[in-house]
């Protein structure tokens, strides 16, 4: 090294080195000169040592510079790896492949406070691009001693370019994936949403995480590769109509809430389910808080007369009652200080179809009494009405029942008071009444009829189911279900109007209306349930289900049946067709 | 063009000056001026001054610096020695005065006001001290009965006492390293080397135990814990610069580190101009040192040998300490980068060093005598 350097440095140095050696041999005799040479040689050697020491030091410095140059810039940044932020979630599609949820690429703004030069200036400039920035909070973040702070997550490309143009030192962007729901609120309660860290926290999004995605993410096994999309049983078109109908009903009847579900009775697939008010999963925090609750699966209600379907099915299934039997509904039942009366009292002996048609509390109560308390409880348990409905959605509420079943409980439960169930499980149990007696777990994922049948349980006899179809049809033509009639689609159903409990007492001024329906009832394909909470009639009084929930089902079926592939049948109960359909 | 036939002072100077050294020094001054555009506007803005306040002052200081360097390079070795001795005497007086009348800056009394100027005598002391010591060492070598080495030791003791009194540990270490290096080259016996090395180590241990801020800095360097803000930021800046730099004006370290125009100009340069540029910068310093030492090696006159070696040693050690701190190879120690960093006293004083080097390395007839004898002995010498 030193000789190399010296050669570059002083062209003649090599010559001088040799000169030293040469010179000595030439002029050795002189004693004085000899001393001088020796000293000169020693000094030269010392200088060579010095040169060597400096060379080593310069090599160290050069090595350090090379080492620094080899370090990639990323490792200097104070932030963690991008894995978690760039982790993909699977797209969520409806049954036809329409996108319900997908990942889009965004950027998030962060600051490295120790690199911030002027926090005041930075805040001021940032707020020109992000006007709703919390100035104090951001200022404190920038002034903090930390090395990393998020300033704003998930910016638009336009905001990013504007912030870049400000040229503020010490801030930067991280690419992130953001969940986007093209349908907005349409399927909000089913699809759910994710938090800012892209973890599913509601609906099917949460279900996906619970299936192992979150576990993978927590051990860093995420990737930003595309994942296989998750296909739901939801039909976005039907879902959209359902929500539209519910929103319309809610505003028309000035109700607190409304909900509805359409389920395939043979597969248990939920085609559509909505609960309004709802929220926009793209911005969950922006909506009102009452929109967050999925009333269909996470709200329980006393279903009212709809429940009579189950009581009559029970009575028929027990064999103690047949469609031809009659019950005396002339006099109210007095029990334990309560009086059980009929709303549409006929004051005569009613046949079983009439009891269903006129929604006779007295007749239903007598049937429950005939079957007995324990079999009643057992029957409702068998239909899954007393336990949490098993499905993929995480938001499922446990129904409530009396702690101890006494006669009065059995009697009130027979017409839908005393047991609170979720509308979803009511529809699921209703499906079992009319599909031949198979209780099928509801699912939000596609399922074939074979799979459904394999996992289903027979809860009532097929003959009972046939009888129930007749009763539903009977009520759909003659009874409270008339307003749900859709020509060609043979809708059958049972209304329910329950007084709501206000301040611990049943109030006649506040109702819960529901309509449990199926179509086409002669060969049921879909069960439909709608409810509307505290509706008002035009006069401002509490409205009943025949005027609220049933017309909503009418709208729903007339608009969705063509999409659901149900062929209309004209001619049997209507006039002859002029054109072939 | 200056004719070789003329024998005037300028013509003599022109044909005998070491152009390689001259070019290196002027190149360094040019780079320093360029980097002042990178490092100092941010500092000026932070202090509420006009953006180009320090750039302007830097350019103004370049004038006396150049005049000093060129002016001193006209001196003969004998004149250099005399100038140095007088200058050393004046600076010692000023360094005593500075203890009583000095301006206290950052916990040290180092500056003395003379009219509108403020001056750091310890900066000017260094070249004068080096040349004086070189003279003492050479006298001792020439006539061992003259106690040159003893005088050099006494002089060193006095200077170090004055520096510690300021206190200025950085200059103390620098002065010790240069003086030790010269003594080593002057043929210090190995026993002495071990003894003095032991003394130096002992001195550092004493400094570590007696001076809490020194202890803190060394602890931080060794453990990497505590407030390593400046060096950490410098390190990040260099890494961010990568091989080719972020581009002029694109650096941010200069906005963060207070001493970005002086002690951390190297990091600023690395961030904006890249590591390759920094390597070139280090190479220039290395060339100065290596050329100085190789010239010293072939020099026949002991005084010139020791003086040139000592003076390039000063530039080499000082630049090495500065770069070493920037690269986290050494504990944090405020030290300017010779001819590059901003600072009037340090720049003019380094030009005194450079001027002395130029004066002592001029081609002189007595050297030519050796070359001629070589020529006669038949060994090829490249044409000049």
Image (tube, rainbow, N blue to C red):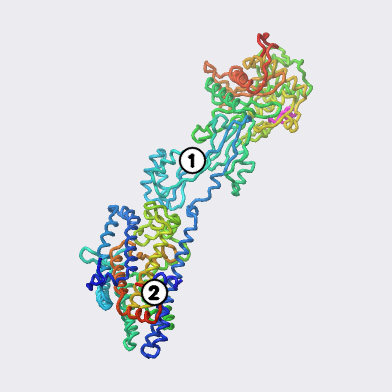
Badge 1 vs badge 2, beta-carbon distance below 8 Å: no
Residue at mark 1: A154
| Quadrant where the image shows the C terminus of chain B | bottom left
Estimate the spatial distance between the alpha carbons at disc 1 and disc 2, rounded to whole Å: 67 Å
Same chain, labels 1 and 2:
yes
Task: From the top left corner, tell me how far across and down residue B276 is, in percent.
Answer: 43, 59
- Helix or strand or loop: what does disc 1 sit on? strand
Relative height, residue A181 to residue B329 (above, below): above
Is most of the magenta stretch helix, strand or loop? Answer: helix
Task: From the top left corner, tell me how far across and down residue A469 is, in percent.
Answer: 72, 19
Q: Nearer the viewer, residue B56 or B114?
A: B56
For the question of whether residue A358 can be seen, the reply is no
Pick whichever of labels 1 and 2 is earlier in the sequence. Answer: 2
* Segment tinted magenta in the rendering: A373-385
Relative height, residue A330 to residue A51 (above, below): above
Q: Nearer the viewer, residue B266 or B199?
A: B266
Write down the chain letter for disc 1.
Answer: A
Mark 1 surroundings: few (<14), some (14-19) or many (≥20) residues within 10 A: some
Mark 2 surroundings: few (<14), some (14-19) or many (≥20) residues within 10 A: some
Name of the residue lying farthest toward the right? A319
Residue at mark 2: A12
Task: From the top left corner, tell me how far across and down residue A210 is, in percent.
Answer: 63, 41
Q: Is residue A151 left or right of residue A446?
A: left
Residue at image location 27% in from the left, 52% down from the top: B50
Q: Quadrant of residue A442?
A: top right
Q: Nearer the viewer, residue A458 or A416?
A: A458
Q: Is residue A176 left or right of residue B367?
A: right
Name of the residue lying farthest toward the left? B115
Assess whether residue A374 is covered by the magenta stretch: yes
- Helix or strand or loop: what does disc 2 sit on? loop
Q: Quadrant of residue A33?
A: bottom left
């Amino acid at each position: 090294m030193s000789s190399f350097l010296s050669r570059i440095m002083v062209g003649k140095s090599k010559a001088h080195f040799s000169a030293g050696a040469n010179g000595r041999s030439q002029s050795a005799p002189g004693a004085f000169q000899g001393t001088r040479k020796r000293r000169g040689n020693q000094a030269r050697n010392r200088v060579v040592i010095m040169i060597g020491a400096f060379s080593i030091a310069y090599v160290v410095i050069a090595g350090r510079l090379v080492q620094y140059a080899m370090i990639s810039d990323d490792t200097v940044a104070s932030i963690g790896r991008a894995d978690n932020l760039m982790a993909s979630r699977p797209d969520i599609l409806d049954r036809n492949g329409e996108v319900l949820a997908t990942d889009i690429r965004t950027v998030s703004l962060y600051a490295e406070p120790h690199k911030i030069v002027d926090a005041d200036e930075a805040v001021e400039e940032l707020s020109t691009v992000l006007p709703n920035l919390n100035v104090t909070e951001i200022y404190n973040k920038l002034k903090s001693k930390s090395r990393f702070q998020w300033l704003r997550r998930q910016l638009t490309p336009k905001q990013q370019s504007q912030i870049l143009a400000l040229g503020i030192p010490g801030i930067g962007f991280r690419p992130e994936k953001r969940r986007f729901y093209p349908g907005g609120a349409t399927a909000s309660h089913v699809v759910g949403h994710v938090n800012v860290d892209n973890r599913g926290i509601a609906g099917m999004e949460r279900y996906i995480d619970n299936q192992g995605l979150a576990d993978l993410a927590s051990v860093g096994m995420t990737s930003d590769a595309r994942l296989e999309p998750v296909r739901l049983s939801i039909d976005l078109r039907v879902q959209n109509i359902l929500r539209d109908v519910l929103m319309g009903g809610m505003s028309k009847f000035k109700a607190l809430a409304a909900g509805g579900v359409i389920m395939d009775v043979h597969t248990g697939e939920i085609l559509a389910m909505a609960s309004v008010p709802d929220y926009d999963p793209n911005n969950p925090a922006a909506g009102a808080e009452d929109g967050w609750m999925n009333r269909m699966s996470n709200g329980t209600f006393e279903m009212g007369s709809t429940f009579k379907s189950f009581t009559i099915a029970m009575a028929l299934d027990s064999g103690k009652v047949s469609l031809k039997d009659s019950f005396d509904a002339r006099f109210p039942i007095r029990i334990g200080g309560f009086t059980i009366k009929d709303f549409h009292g006929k004051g005569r002996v009613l046949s079983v179809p009439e009891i269903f048609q006129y929604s006779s509390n007295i007749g239903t109560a007598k049937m429950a009494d005939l079957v007995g308390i324990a079999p009643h409880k057992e029957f409702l348990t068998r239909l899954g009405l007393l336990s949490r409905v098993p499905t993929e959605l995480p938001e499922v509420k446990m129904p409530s029942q009396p702690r101890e079943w006494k006669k009065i409980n059995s009697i009130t439960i027979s017409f839908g008071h005393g047991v609170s169930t979720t509308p979803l499980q009511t529809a699921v149990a209703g499906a079992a009444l009319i599909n031949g007696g198979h209780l099928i777990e509801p699912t939000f994922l596609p399922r074939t009829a074979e799979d459904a049948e394999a996992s289903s349980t027979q809860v009532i006899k097929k003959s009972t189911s046939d009888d129930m179809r007749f009763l539903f049809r009977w009520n759909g033509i003659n009874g409270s279900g008339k307003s749900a009639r859709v020509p060609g689609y043979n809708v059958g159903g049972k209304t329910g109007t329950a007084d709501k409990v206000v301040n611990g007492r049943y109030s006649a001024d506040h109702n819960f209306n529901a309509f449990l329906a199926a179509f086409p009832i002669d060969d049921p394909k879909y069960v439909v349930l709608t409810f509307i909470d505290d509706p008002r009639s035009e006069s401002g009084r509490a409205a009943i289900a025949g005027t609220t929930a049933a017309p909503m089902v009418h709208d729903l079926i007339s608009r969705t049946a063509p999409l659901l592939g149900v062929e209309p049948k004209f001619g049997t109960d209507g006039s002859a067709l002029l054109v072939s359909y | 063009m200056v004719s070789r036939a003329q024998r005037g002072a300028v013509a003599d100077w022109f044909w005998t000056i070491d152009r390689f050294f001259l070019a290196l020094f002027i190149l360094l001054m040019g780079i320093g001026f360029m980097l002042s555009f990178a490092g100092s506007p941010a500092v000026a803005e932070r202090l509420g001054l006009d953006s180009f306040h320090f750039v302007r002052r830097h350019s103004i200081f370049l004038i006396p610096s150049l005049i000093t360097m060129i002016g001193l390079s006209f001196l003969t070795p004998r004149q250099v020695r005399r100038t140095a001795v007088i200058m050393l005497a004046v600076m010692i007086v000023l360094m005593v005065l500075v203890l009583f009348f000095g301006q206290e800056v950052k916990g040290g009394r180092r500056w003395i006001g003379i009219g509108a100027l403020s001056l750091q005598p310890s900066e000017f002391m260094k070249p004068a001290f080096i040349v004086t010591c070189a003279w003492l060492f050479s006298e001792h070598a020439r006539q061992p009965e003259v106690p040159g080495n003893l005088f050099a030791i006494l002089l060193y003791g006095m200077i170090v006492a004055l520096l510690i009194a300021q206190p200025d540990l950085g200059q103390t270490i620098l002065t010790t390293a240069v003086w030790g290096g010269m003594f080593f080259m002057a043929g210090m016996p190995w026993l002495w080397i071990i003894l003095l090395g032991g003394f130096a180590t002992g001195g550092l241990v004493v400094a570590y135990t007696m001076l809490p801020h020194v202890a803190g800095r060394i602890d931080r360097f060794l453990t990497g814990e505590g407030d390593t803000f400046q060096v950490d930021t410098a390190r990040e800046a260099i890494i961010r610069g990568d091989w080719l730099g972020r581009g002029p004006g694109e650096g941010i370290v200069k906005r963060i580190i207070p001493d970005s125009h002086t002690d951390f100009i190297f990091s600023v340069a690395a961030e904006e101009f890249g590591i390759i540029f920094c390597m070139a910068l280090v190479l220039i310093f290395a060339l100065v040192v290596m050329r100085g030492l190789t010239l010293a090696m072939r020099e026949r006159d002991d005084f010139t040998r020791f003086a040139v070696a000592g003076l390039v040693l000063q530039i080499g050690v000082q630049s090495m300490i500065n770069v070493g701190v920037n690269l986290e190879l050494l504990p944090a120690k405020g030290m300017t980068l010779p001819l590059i960093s901003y600072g009037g006293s340090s720049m003019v004083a380094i030009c005194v060093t450079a001027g002395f080097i130029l004066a002592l390395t001029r081609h002189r007839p007595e050297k030519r005598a050796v070359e001629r004898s070589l020529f006669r002995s038949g060994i090829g010498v490249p044409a000049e």
